Structures are given as C-alpha cells and as structure tokens.
Image (tube, grey):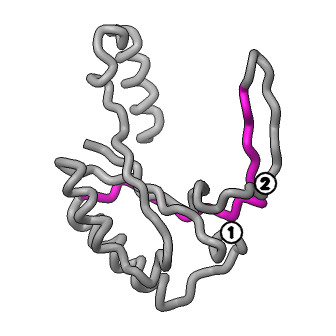
Amino acid sequence: MRFMVMIKATPQTEAGEMPSEDVLTAMGRYNEDLANAGVLLGGEGLHPSHKGARIRFNDGQCSVTDGPFAETRELIAGYWLFQTASLQEAVDWVKRCPQSAIGDSEIEIRQIFEAEDFGAEFTPELREQEDRLRAQLNQ
C-alpha cells in the first residue's frame, strides 16, 4: 500500500523560516531510517504559499489565484510517499518523526489509489497506458 503523508503548514513554515541544522540533522536521520526500511518512496518540503497559486475550475471556466492563502492549517508544508503493509504501519512510522522538525503541527496520511482500486472501468487499454507512463517516469 502506498500513502501520501502530508505535513501541514505552520505560521513558521508559511513565513519561510528555514529549519536549524539540528532539525535538518534529525530529519535526515529519520528519512534515512525510512529509506533503509524500504518505506520511503519520496518526499520534499514545499515553499510557503505566497510563492504558489491555486487554479479553480468551475462551470467550464478556469481562474488563477496567487498566494498567499489564508488558512494555514489547511496548507501543506511538505510530504513523504510511503510504502507500507497497512495504514497502521504508516501511522507508526509517522509517530517516529522528530518532534523538533514539525513543531506544533499536524500530519495527514492518505492512501494512494492503485490500479486495482478502479475496477472494470480501468480497461486493459488504460492499464497499458498507465504502465507506459510509469515506465517513462522511472527512467
């Protein structure tokens, strides 16, 4: 099972405050543990929302809003992609995250859809297309 683990933004991350060397060291150790256990598929920190944009689609129209965005608690400051046997295993790994790195924040875990989750609507042709795209991305 694959999971997206999203680290919610804080006032500090939205202000663009960079982590200390101690925090970077602790996160580096944690990420190394994840990688060594075969759990970590990827992950990155994100710039504050004032450097981003939102694109809204409504009634066939598209509108763009530049950041910053008001609701800090709904923003994402970074993410990991985990591969674990269960949601509980992903939760257990997140519980090991260095507290100094996330401060007073929240982390959300969401399972990623796999091809088999889509049922018959995911035709053999669509599966083949998905396989081609994945192979292209893994080059």
Please report the residue visible at 76 percent of the width from the left and 47 percent of the height from the top: 53
Mark 2 neighbour density, 10 Å: few (under 14) some (14–19) many (20 or more):
few
**Residue 14, numbered circle:** 1
Say which of 78 and 31 sits in front: 78
Q: Nearer the viewer, residue 16 or 127?
A: 16
Q: Evaluate whether residue 68 shows in this view.
A: yes
Quadrant of the image occupied by residue 91: bottom left
Where residue 132 appears, x then y in whole percent?
42, 24
Q: Residue at x 78, y 54 (%)?
A: 67
Question: Looking at the image, which is closer to me, 132 or 56?
Answer: 56
- Quadrant of the snapshot with the C terminus: top left
Give the residue type that dot 2 points to: Gly
Where is residue 25, by image quadrant?
A: bottom left
Q: Is residue 139 left or right of residue 53?
A: left
- Kindly identify which residue carries mark 2: 67
Label whose residue precedes the other's in the sequence (2 or 1) = 1
Label 2: element kind:
loop
- The question of residue 51 being in magenta is answered with yes
Q: Is residue 51 visible?
A: no
User: Can you give x and y, in whole percent of width and height, for residue 42 in the image?
Assistant: 41, 56
Vertical placement of residue 103 versus 87, above or below: below
Point 34% across, 75% down: residue: 30
Look at label 1 and name its amino acid.
Glu
Question: 111 above or below 17?
Answer: above
Judged from this view, the residue extending furthest toward the left is 85
Element type where label 1 sits in the image: helix
Magenta range is 39-57
Left or right? Give the position of 93 relative to 66. left
